[in-house]
Image (cartoon, grey):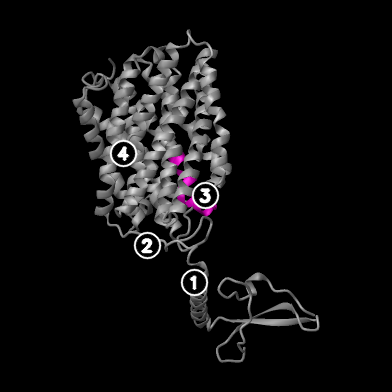
């Protein structure tokens, strides 16, 4: 009687299929593992072939396989050389100094972008559209969070592709660009629409008041802002990643901060300008709001078709909605906190600092998540049980004090928080932004909130990226939206708490109100 072998009992040569090696099981030190396969003989009868594999000679078998594989590749080189791109580059060797040096300039650039966004928010919070339609404040963290949901995810995805050699040929580069740009337009339109719904719901629940014109205004402003901002920032991201790779800089260190450097400012300026313009036209053009929404929704089928053409984005198009939508909901909760806080004249000064603390925390954790994801991709594929086993619950000591490169980068990023925020606070003070005097006690409370925010985010990033990797999910597509949304929620919540404590203890010199 013949039996069919299990797949694990068959010795595969060069990954092409089972083949039998004429090895004897009688040699010294050999412990054969026997498996059988059925083949048809010349007379049509089944012939049983016994496949033997030796544990003791495993090294020799591996060496034989390597030689045969090299021979097979050399024999087939004439046929496949034209289809193969260059070999993936080896990972860059980085010290703490080199990591800090590469991250510092993009970090400061991104920080000054958030400072500019804070100055804009401090000005526009007094505009009529923000005073009459206060739900626009709820849109602010959700739409600013799009850089985490979309642009930073795009930057992380393209940085990983560049580091593992998937963007080295013009054909691969063009496919990645068109697929990813179309994908973020689909996501921006849908998320912008859902963010407006969340703003309407969160604005209606506390007050019990619902206005249809205001709902249409929020929808049109949100969708238009999300679409235009994602288009502009996506093009900037592609240029940054291609340029950084050409000059030998790790894109993981620069792409995500630069994505945020202009992201907050562009998005907030677009939201303010579009909402103000639509608000002024509501009496002249009665159907302007539905027409704007219908125009961007009508473009969705075009972007879906383009995104489906690329295998790299087709999967994200179908399965990448959960983190984006949940992250938008988390950021909207932060927006509700912002709306209720800045609406109180005692805490109007909080507006200028909110984009700064949220942006800095999101930028730093996005860099860390992108680096960990690239490190894991260089050692296997999501779900593989490689040497870099996913950690179920890492200890804080492992996250911040172990000798590996990811722990080193976590320490560097954490050490950037205090000097970075001091520079940004000084810039705000010099520009006479906000309604808050920078006293020592205010700086202590602000720094405590910022350090606690980044500390929590870096620890969650270490756990979340490895956990998603162990579940077979690509962290580039799933982790950063959650992390940046948590950064918005933590930053807004801790900052609001600091302002409330300062007001309660009666720090008159701080002048947290007008």
Q: Is mark 3 on a helix, strand or loop?
A: helix
Q: Is residue 479 magenta?
A: yes
Q: Is mark 2 on a helix, strand or loop?
A: loop
Of marks 2 and 4, which one's residue comes earlier in the chain?
2
Q: Residue at x 52, y 13 (%)?
A: 213
Give 453 or 275, whichever is nearer the viewer. 275
Residue 400 x/y as whole percent: 34, 51
Tell me the number on the disc at residue 451: 4
Image quadrant occupied by the N terminus: bottom right
Q: Can residue 504 be seen in this view?
A: no
The quarter holding residue 210 reads top right
Tell me the number on the disc at residue 367: none
Give 385 or 221, whichever is nearer the viewer. 221
Q: Mark 2 points at which residue?
A: 90
Q: How crowded is mark 1: few (under 14 residues within 10 Å), some or many (20 or more)?
A: few
- Kindly report which numbered mark, 2 or 4, lies closer to the viewer in this rendering: 2
Q: Mark 3 points at which residue?
A: 312
Residue 343 x/y as whole percent: 38, 16
Of marks 3 and 1, which one's residue comes earlier in the chain?
1
- Kindly report which numbered mark, 3 or 1, lies closer to the viewer in this rendering: 1
Q: How far apart are marks 1 and 2 (CA)?
A: 22 Å
Q: Distance between the residues labelled 2 and 4?
A: 34 Å
Q: Can residue 127 be seen in this view?
A: yes
């Amino acid at each position: 009687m013949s039996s069919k072998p299990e797949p694990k009992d068959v010795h595969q040569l060069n990954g092409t299929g089972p083949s039998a090696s004429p090895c004897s099981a009688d040699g010294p030190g050999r412990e054969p593992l026997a498996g059988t396969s059925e083949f048809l003989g010349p007379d049509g009868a089944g012939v049983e072939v016994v496949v033997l594999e030796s544990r003791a000679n495993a090294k020799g078998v591996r060496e034989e396989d390597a030689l045969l594989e090299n021979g097979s590749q050399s024999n087939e080189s004439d046929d496949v050389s034209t289809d193969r791109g260059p070999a993936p580059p080896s990972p860059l060797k980085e010290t703490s100094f080199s990591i800090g040096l590469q991250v510092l300039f993009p970090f400061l650039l991104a920080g000054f972008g958030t400072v500019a966004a804070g100055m804009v928010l401090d000005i526009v919070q007094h505009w009529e559209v923000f005073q009459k339609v206060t739900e626009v404040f709820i849109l602010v963290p959700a739409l600013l969070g799009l850089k985490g949901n979309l642009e930073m995810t795009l930057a992380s995805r393209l940085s990983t592709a560049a580091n593992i050699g998937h963007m080295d040929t013009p054909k691969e580069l063009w496919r990645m660009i068109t697929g990813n740009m179309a994908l973020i337009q689909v996501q921006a339109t849908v998320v912008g629409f859902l963010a407006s719904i969340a703003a309407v719901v969160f604005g209606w629940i506390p007050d019990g008041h619902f206005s249809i014109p205001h709902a249409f205004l929020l929808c049109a402003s949100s969708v238009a802002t999300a679409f235009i901002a994602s288009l502009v920032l996506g093009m900037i991201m592609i240029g940054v990643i291609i340029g950084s790779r050409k000059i030998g800089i790790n894109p993981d260190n620069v792409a995500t901060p630069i994505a945020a450097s202009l992201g907050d400012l562009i998005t907030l300026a677009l939201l303010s300008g579009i909402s103000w313009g639509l608000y002024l036209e509501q009496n002249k053009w009665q159907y302007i709001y539905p027409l704007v929404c219908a125009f961007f929704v009508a473009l969705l089928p075009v972007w879906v078709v383009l995104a489906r053409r690329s295998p790299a984005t087709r999967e994200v198009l179908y399965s990448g909605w959960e983190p984006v939508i949940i992250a938008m909901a988390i950021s909207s909760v932060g927006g509700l906190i912002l709306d209720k806080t800045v609406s109180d004249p005692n805490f109007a000064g909080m507006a200028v600092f909110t984009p700064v603390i949220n942006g800095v925390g999101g930028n730093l954790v996005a860099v860390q998540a992108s680096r960990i994801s690239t490190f894991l991709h260089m050692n296997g594929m999501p779900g593989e049980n490689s040497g870099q086993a996913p950690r179920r619950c890492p200890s804080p000591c492992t996250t911040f004090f172990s000798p590996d490169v990811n722990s080193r980068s976590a320490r560097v990023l954490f050490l950037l928080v205090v000097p970075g925020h001091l520079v940004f606070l000084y810039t705000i003070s010099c520009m006479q932004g906000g309604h808050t005097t920078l006293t020592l006690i205010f700086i202590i409370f602000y720094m405590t909130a910022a350090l606690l925010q980044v500390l929590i985010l870096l620890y969650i990033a270490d756990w979340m990226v490895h956990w998603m990797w162990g579940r077979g999910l690509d962290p580039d597509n799933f982790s950063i939206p959650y992390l940046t949304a948590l950064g918005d929620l933590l930053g807004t919540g801790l900052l609001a708490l600091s302002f409330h404590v300062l007001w309660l203890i009666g720090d008159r010199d701080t002048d947290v109100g007008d």
